[in-house]
Image (spheres, coloured by chain):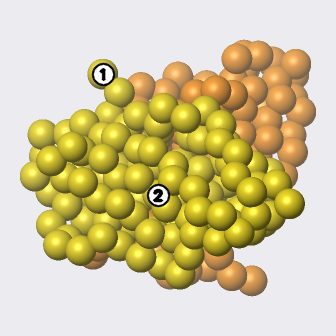
Chain colours: A yellow, B orange
Amino acid sequence: AQKITQTQPGMFVQEKEAVTLDCTYDTSDPSYGLFWYKQPSSGEMIFLIYQGSYDQQNATEGRYSLNFQKARKSANLVISASQLGDSAMYFCAMREGRSGYSTLTFGKGTMLLVSP
Amino acid sequence: ETGVTQTPRHLVMGMTNKKSLKCEQHLGHNAMYWYKQSAKKPLELMFVYSLEERVENNSVPSRFSPECPNSSHLFLHLHTLQPEDSALYLCASSQGRNDPSPLHFGNGTRLTVT
């Protein structure tokens, strides 16, 4: 079974509008972390935002916010006021358990295209 | 130079060649990773080094051989590869396990096996 599911292969949004990218996860570990990364055409994976399983509030980083619904096991990324530079692949990832390093399991990604 | 640097950016090699991918991190991190990114597939973890010791090897074929001489450098030695090994190979680093401890990635090496 997939641990991270991103059901939207592609999304379109107009500049200045908000967009939500979906992510659901599957784990039985009570301690986990959820990450979102952005990958532009250059290839580099850029860390955007993090949500810990014990965090009481939804994470926010500038125009990015994470809609964390623990009971539904979803961690959707919300991008407000989209910009042309937001066009990229977006990956949701999860880290389970606790160890001295940070192994992530990634979803297949969502391609976001922002139009003028 | 800052961040995670990977060289070369692009590599074309024949199935009988031997080549190496290089990764260097300037962030003072203590863990380094190799991921493989193939078209239409999630990123696949290949190897993890923590404090210069290999701690994970995700059933990667022996034609891929990692090396971590120190906490700042990571190599992936390639030999007798197959065309299906063509992919983007991403190196990453992280610092310990204090949340969030995200992975910091390089730009990747685009490998084509002919």
The image shows residue A6, relative to residue A37, as above or below, that is: above
| Labels 2, 1: front one | 2
Residue A33 horizontal side relative to residue B102, left or right = left
Chain of the residue on which disc 2 is drawn: A
Residue A107 seen anywhere in this rendered image of the structure = yes
- The residue that appears at 47% across and 37% down in the rendered structure is A6
Q: Amino acid at mark 1?
A: Ala
Relative to A110, A6 lies left or right:
left
Residue that carries the numbered disc 2 in the rendered image: A77
The residue sitting at 19% across, 52% down in the picture is A70
Residue B111: x and y in percent read 79, 35
Quarter of the image containing the C terminus of chain A? bottom right
Residue A62, placed above or below residue A55: below
Which image quarter holds the N terminus of chain A?
top left
- Residue B56: mark in rendering: none
Residue A96 picture location, percent across and down: 24, 50
Say whether residue A69 is left or right of residue B54.
Answer: left
Query: Image point 87% across, 45% down: which residue?
Result: B10
- Say which amino acid is labelled 2: Leu
Q: Is residue B51 visible?
A: no
**Numbered badge on residue A1:** 1
CB within 8 Å, label 2 to label 1: no
